[in-house]
Image (cartoon, grey):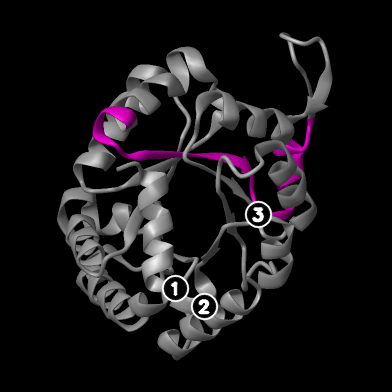
């Protein structure tokens, strides 16, 4: 079963399209056991309101991929949730392949990759590894921060068609061409979500980060065409993470 289908089933079973961005502030290395416990407690509180959990490098750097992180992945899977690694793969093919193999070996169901690196001797090996293991690859099409336009919004020249187009439009088209399992478009830019949705149709789901702390709005993102909402600090830094996660989940369900 493909990652895309598993995500759909998780969202249906959990009655949630919320992906938790498992991000916590810096902790000194000697406090990493406290960080592990904090992550575990947060997970136990909010898992009923999620369909998936997304790791960035925060916890990997502190807890170790095959130590604390792998233990958390196993717990997440026990809760019936999917796990995504936001590593933004962006190197030469041989390095990308090894990166993907390590993350998938640790138990991640999908990883996020940056299409800037291209296909041949770039992301092609990542897709090869993913397909062989029935895992997913999600492409980063437009980020959620204010400076995203400097890279993802620049005008580029398409050597195949001879036309000029916006970088994120090119990336959305590559997602179709490469048969990606999802794309990332910031919830802070609903107009970009809408434009990417028009390109993708219903073939590829859109994951939208930036809800809450960065100012992205649930209703705007979903109406524009987002399938999954990625929410981090609004939940992980909340005094009552369970209550916050439930409110966000319920608000998203009301918009469907």
Residue depicted at 46% across the width and 71% down the height: 16
Q: Position of residue 118 (x, y in %)?
A: 54, 20
Marks counted in the figure total 3
Q: Position of residue 255 (x, y in %)?
A: 66, 74
Residue depicted at 23% across the width and 61% down the height: 77
Residue range in magenta is 131-154
Q: Nearer the viewer, mark 3 or mark 2?
A: 2
Question: Do the numbered discs 2 and 1 sit on residues whose CB atoms are within 8 Å?
Answer: yes
Q: Quadrant of the C terminus?
A: bottom right
Q: Which of marks 3 and 1 is in front?
A: 1
Q: Mark 1 points at which residue?
A: 15
The one of 208 and 66 positioned closer to us in this rendering: 208
74 horizontally vs 100: left or right: left
- Residue 186 marker: 3
Residue depicted at 55% across the width and 48% down the height: 205
- Residue 249 marker: 2
Question: Label 1 crowding class (10 Å Cα cut-off): few <14, some 14-19, many 20+?
Answer: some
82 horizontally vs 161: left or right: left
Q: Does the magenta stretch include residue 136?
A: yes
**Residue 43 lies in what quarter of the image?**
bottom left
Vertical position of residue 137 compared to residue 32: above or below: above
Q: Distance between the residues labelled 3 and 1?
A: 22 Å
The one of 96 and 166 positioned closer to us in this rendering: 166
Q: Which of marks 2 and 1 is in front?
A: 1
Vertical position of residue 166 compared to residue 248: above or below: above
Q: Earlier in the sequence, mark 2 or mark 1?
A: 1
Question: Do the numbered discs 3 and 2 sit on residues whose CB atoms are within 8 Å?
Answer: no
């Amino acid at each position: 079963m493909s990652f895309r289908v598993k995500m759909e089933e998780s969202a249906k079973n959990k009655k949630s399209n919320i992906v938790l961005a498992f991000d916590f502030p810096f902790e000194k290395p000697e406090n990493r056991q406290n960080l592990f416990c904090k992550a575990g407690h947060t997970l136990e509180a909010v898992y009923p309101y999620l369909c998936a959990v997304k790791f960035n490098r925060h916890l990997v750097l502190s807890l170790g991929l095959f130590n604390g992180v792998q233990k958390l992945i196993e717990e997440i899977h026990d809760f019936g949730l999917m796990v995504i690694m936001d590593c933004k793969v962006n190197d030469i093919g041989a390095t990308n392949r090894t990166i993907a193999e390590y993350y998938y070996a640790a138990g991640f169901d999908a990883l996020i990759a940056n299409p800037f690196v291209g296909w041949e001797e770039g992301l092609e090996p990542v897709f090869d590894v993913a397909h062989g293991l029935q895992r997913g690859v999600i492409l980063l099409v437009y980020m959620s921060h204010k400076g995203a336009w400097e890279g993802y919004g620049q005008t580029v020249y398409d050597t195949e068609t001879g036309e000029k187009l916006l970088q994120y439009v090119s990336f959305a088209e590559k997602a179709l061409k490469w048969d990606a399992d999802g794309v990332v478009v910031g919830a802070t830019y609903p107009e970009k979500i809408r434009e990417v949705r028009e390109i993708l149709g219903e073939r590829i789901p859109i994951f939208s980060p930036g809800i809450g702390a960065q100012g992205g709005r649930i209703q705007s993102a979903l109406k524009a065409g987002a399938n999954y909402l990625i929410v981090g600090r609004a939940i992980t830094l909340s005094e009552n993470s369970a209550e916050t996660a439930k409110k966000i989940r319920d608000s998203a369900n009301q918009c469907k």
